[in-house]
Image (tube, rainbow, N blue to C red):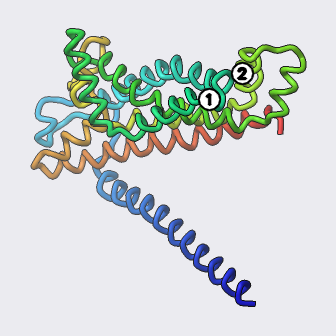
Amino acid sequence: MKQRSRAQVEEKVFKFLMLLSFILVTGSLGFILLVVLIRGLPALSLQMIFSTPKGGFYLGKEGGIFNAIVGSLYLAIGATLLAIIFSLPLSLYLHAYARRTRWSDFVRLALDVLWGIPSIVYGAFGFTLMLALGMRASLLGGIITLTLLEIPIMTRAIDEVLRMAPPDLEQASFALGSTRLETAWKVITRQMLPGIITAILLAFGRAIGDAASVLFTAGYTDRMPTSLLRPVASLPLAVFFQLGTPFPEVQQRAYASALILTVLVLAISLGSRWLAGRLSRYSIK
């Protein structure tokens, strides 16, 4: 009887903690969105979205942040494509060949450590690497740095997705004479494609919203990106620079820029869920 009552108390405590955690998470998200909407929506306009900064933009005059929107997309898309080239093969190797070896455990630990490193450290490393190569702050430098930031995130996420694949599917593929590589690439990857796409978009969302890693490597400019070797603007830095001015009009534009960035990240998250749901129809349950 005592054990039963104790179990009921524990269940109520854990239910309360879960409910409290849910309220904190959803409440934090709702509060952030509310603040950004209230402070950013009045300054948001088509002119701000589709025009570049004019003279005196940071003094409250005309202009927009279209260069920063395009620059952020260039940086995130370029880095994500490069990260896929390295992350997907590494994840397939860990799943198909390394398995549960000391080497695979070490690689996963290293990736977890790299995932937890602050992005400013990646920015400092990328800046040092650029100096060694004789590069200046540029779109290419920002892409390289964001690629280094994305690789551990994307690799570990894809690795966890591949480990959720049904073991029977893999055994059936081996029984038909497939090699490890054929099984991993043609069977497991196709089966787990919804989760892999979600992992890729997760890394993409981190890249498009990061400011510290591109502060020294991508630079900033009021012009549209025209070359890999020239500086490029980004939305996180646009928010940072506008919020640092003493002019209320420009600070309000910073919240509008943050609103645009938030909408982009939310669109990516919702898009990944929709795409994963569509692709999961063709997966074996």
- Measured along the vertical axis of the image, is residue 236 above or below residue 89? below
- Indicate the position of residue 137 as horizontal and vertical percent values: 22, 19
Front-lying residue, 22 or 178: 178
- Indicate the position of residue 160 as horizontal and vertical percent values: 62, 37
Answer with left or right where residue 64 lies relative to residue 172.
Answer: left
Front-lying residue, 39 or 201: 201
- Which residue is tagged 1? 101
- Which residue is tagged 2? 184
- Name the kind of residue labelled 2 in the image: Ala
- Name the kind of residue labelled 1 in the image: Thr
- Indicate the position of residue 208 as horizontal and vertical percent values: 40, 34
Answer with left or right where residue 85 lies relative to residue 93.
Answer: left
Q: Quadrant of residue 143?
A: top left
Q: Nearer the viewer, mark 2 or mark 1?
A: 1
Answer with left or right where residue 67 lies relative to residue 277.
Answer: left
- Mark 2 or mark 1: which comes first in sequence? 1
Image point (54%, 72%), residue name: 17
- Measured along the vertical axis of the image, is residue 181 above or below residue 158? above
Q: CA distance from mark 2 to mark 1?
A: 18 Å
